[in-house]
Structures are given as structure tokens and as C-alpha cells.
Amino acid sequence: MVVPSMTLGGLFVGAPDGGFVGQRGHLSSDGGRWQCLERNNENIVFKWKCGIFVITSENRKPYWSLVFPPNGKGHHFSLLQHETEKLRNDIEKMRSELRHEIDKVTAGQRLDLNLERGRIREELSNQNAETNNLTNKLDRVSNYGSVWEIHSLRAQLEAAKYDVIKYCIGTLVSISAVGLAVLRILM
């Protein structure tokens, strides 16, 4: 059977005695997962998704170094590089998500502050209008009060004037009565 032309490297690692160690993930070109089912001296049987592929001794030579790399250190290093790159990408993705969330929260807080500031300004303008209205009412009452006070003062002055005239007339009448009495006694 023919093995499709895709990257098989990084899937399996050979043990020092040439045996199979285990599966390391999937690096196929279409995202498929390879699994080693059987290994003997002649054939290596791989299961890939739904199909089974057999690498025989004739056609395994080009793929042998990809499936079982001769140097485990290079393969391990490439796996580490791949994992490091994945972690870097994940970190960058988390950083961008965190920046996005921070920007979203900051924008929400700015919006809340602006709304609160607008509400406070509106409340202050309402209070200023109410204060001006009360000041105008107080001025009107004061003006009406002063007019009322003026009228009451005039009435009091008129009453006091009548009292003064009354007392003056009473005083004159009493002085004249005393004078007439003194005159009658003396004469």
C-alpha cells in the first residue's frame, strides 16, 4: 500500500534497541493522527484515521528516517521548539485577550464616569435653577413685604399723629381749665 506524501516526522521515536517507544502527537499535513498498530522486521502498520497503511521493507527506506529519526536529540529539540512556539503563541493570544478585556473594562469605566459626570452637571444645573427661582421669590416677597411694611408704618404714623393731636388738645383744654379755675379763685 502507498503511504501518502505528508510529513510523518515527529510522530514516533525509536527506542535504543530499535523498538517502538510511543506516539508523540500528530504533524500530518491534513491534521490526521497516526498510530502504530504493529511492528515486525518486515512491515510497520500504521492506522491513519479510517484507513490502514502498511510501510513494507521496500518502501520504508524513504520514510524510515521520518518515522524513526536516527538522532533522538534533534527530534527532541524539534519537539521542544514546536512546543515552545505553541506556548509563545498561546501566551500572545492570552496577552491580546487580556489587553482586549482591559480595554473593554477601561472603556466601560470611562463611559460610567462620563455618564456620572453628566448626571452631576445636570443635577447642579437643576439646583442652580431652583436656587435662582427661590432667590427671585424671596426678592418678590421682600419687595411686597417692604411695601406692606411701608403701608403699616404709614398707618402707625397716622395713628400716632392722631394721638399727638388728641393729647395736645387734651393738654390745652386741661391747661385752660386750670387757668380759668385759678382766675376764678383770684378774682
Image: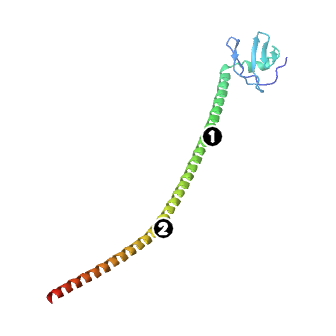
Give the Cα distance between marks 2 and 1.
60 Å
Q: Amino acid at mark 2?
A: Arg
Q: Earlier in the sequence, mark 2 or mark 1?
A: 1
* Disc 1 element: helix
Q: Residue at x 59, y 47 (%)?
A: 111
Query: 8 or 165, which lies in front?
Result: 165
Q: Residue furthest right?
A: 1
Residue of label 2:
140
Q: Residue furthest left?
A: 186
| Occupied quadrant, residue 78 | top right
How many numbered dots are placed on residues in this image? Answer: 2
Q: Locate residue 140, reporting x and y percent.
A: 48, 67
- Horizontally, residue 147 falls left or right of residue 61, namely left
Q: Quadrant of the N terminus?
A: top right
| Occupied quadrant, residue 37 | top right
133 vs 182: above or below: above
* Disc 2 element: helix
